[in-house]
Amino acid sequence: MYLLFVRKRIMEFRSLYSLEELRQLRDWFVSHRENVPQQIRVDKATYYKDVPFAIESIIGILDNVKETNENFGGLYYTFFLLKEKLEEELKD
């Protein structure tokens, strides 16, 4: 028998996020962009080599969201995962 331990994510994947959720996510990145590490591994498959640059890019993308769209659900989800990991790192 194999047991798989997966840490509970704060935000589960959804294909559609509200504009309010995306605005709050953007605001979080804006308010924390000065205190982030240079590099971070979110999970086995996701590594950010230049976190400050990634955050500036994310802010730029979220600044241009005018309506919700299911096609970008995966992209937005990766932003939420990065936020979650950064929250863990900034707590320490």
Image: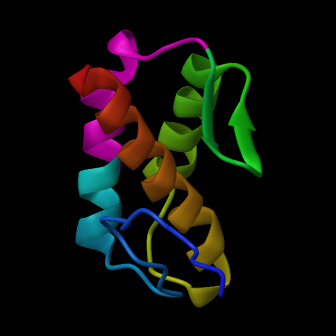
Quarter of the image containing the C terminus?
top left
Q: Nearer the viewer, residue 69 or 89?
A: 89
Compared with 22, 90 (above or below) is above
Give yes or no for residue 87 being in the magenta stretch. no
Residue 49 x/y as whole percent: 73, 22
Report the coloring of the rendering.
Answer: rainbow
**Taking 6 as reference, is 90 left or right?**
left
**Taking 33 as reference, is 76 left or right?**
right
Give yes or no for residue 27 being in the magenta stretch. yes
Quarter of the image containing the N terminus?
bottom right
Query: Bounds of the magenta span?
Result: 26-38
Residue at position x 27%, y 39% in the image: 28
Compared with 81, 33 (above or below) is above
Residue at position x 23%, y 54% in the image: 24
Residue at position x 38%, y 66% in the image: 9
Q: What number of labels is visible?
A: 0
Residue at position x 50%, y 45% in the image: 82
Residue 70 x/y as whole percent: 58, 88
Task: State whether the magenta stretch is mostly helix, strand or loop.
Answer: helix
Residue 5 x/y as whole percent: 50, 68
Residue 32 x/y as whole percent: 30, 24
